[in-house]
Amino acid sequence: MNITASRKVSLAPLADTGETDPRSQRARAERMAVTPLGGGLYEVESQSDHTYFADLLGGRCTCPDHMMRGVRCKHLRRVAIEINEGRVPPPGKEAVECARCESTVFVDEQKADAIHFCDHCELHPGEVVIDRNTGDLMVVVSMPGYRADSVDVPGKDCTVAEYPANEGYPESDPVVEVLYPIPAGLRPEQLNPSHVRRYSFPRSRLRRPEPPADQSELTDFREADFRESN
């Protein structure tokens, strides 16, 4: 499990919140580090260098303030703040690295050992992408989680990373399986294996289409064209 702590810092105060509870104020102002331990349990290193354990789901903390007074202490509040600000994962989630860009992603604790991608890097089945080399339009089938230097190109004595057209793209790039769109008007009996063949590309070679600069292009029809068609 990834138990990397957040940096031990004080957090910027929120302007004009009207917060008057001293524990809430100290939860932001004091230097603390929060480490997720799993199952909703967090280790909190306080400004005084004491370490306490905050059970967020149970609303309990091992600090004297909570143990003796039964109050919602600054440590529980600090954990909640860091979760809300995306500094640490919420209960049931674990922080892992995106397999492509190494940015932090919060995923289900039970699936943390799998390959994960951030929203920017992940391409979903059915998503339309463009080949940076040729400008061709393609449809994503899957991202199986394999590196470009570990997937062989069928019929070629090389990997996806070694394929000449992929020169310059990272060898560690995750592979994306795609299909070229089936030509419009093709009858079922005209289909052949090449129409449904999957191709493997390094992720960096593919990009999402840019939205139209003029959104009216999506819905507007030229009046002259409409008259001519009728």
Image (cartoon, grey):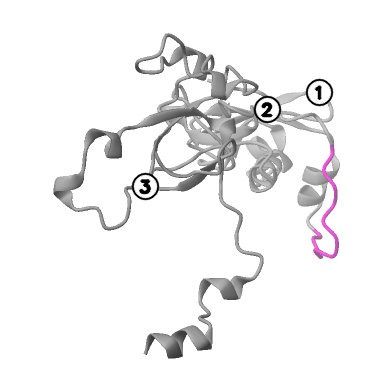
Of 89 and 118, the residue lying toward us: 118
User: Which labelled disc corresponds to residue 181?
Assistant: 3
Hey, what amino acid is under mark 2?
Answer: Tyr
Of 4 and 72, the residue lying toward us: 4
- Along the polypeptide, which appears first: circle 1 or circle 3? 1
Of 33 and 54, the residue lying toward us: 33
Say if 3 sits above or below 218 in the image: above
Which residue is drawn at the image coordinates 29% and 34% (left, top)?
194
Say if 26 sits above or below 142 in the image: below
Distance of label 1 from label 2 (alpha carbons): 10 Å
Distance of label 1 from label 3 (alpha carbons): 60 Å
Which residue is drawn at the image coordinates 80% and 29% (left, top)?
8
The residue range painted magenta reads 10-20
In the picture, measured across the screen, residue 196 lies left or right of residue 83, that is left
Q: State which mark lies toward you, 1 or 3.
A: 3
Residue carrying label 2: 52
Q: Secondary structure at mark 3?
A: loop
- The image position of residue 219, as x and y in percent, is 51, 76
- The image position of residue 227, as x and y in percent, is 44, 91
The answer to whether residue 77 shows anywhere in this view is: yes
User: Which labelled disc corresponds to residue 49?
Assistant: 1
- Along the polypeptide, which appears first: circle 2 or circle 3? 2
Quarter residue 74 falls in:
top right
In the picture, measured across the screen, residue 26 lies left or right of residue 178, that is right
- Residue extending farthest front: 228
The answer to whether residue 40 shows anywhere in this view is: no
Q: State which mark lies toward you, 2 or 3.
A: 3
> Main SS type for the magenta part?
loop
Q: Is residue 22 magenta?
A: no
Neighbor class of circle 1 (other Cα within 10 Å; few <14, some 14-19, many 20+) is: few
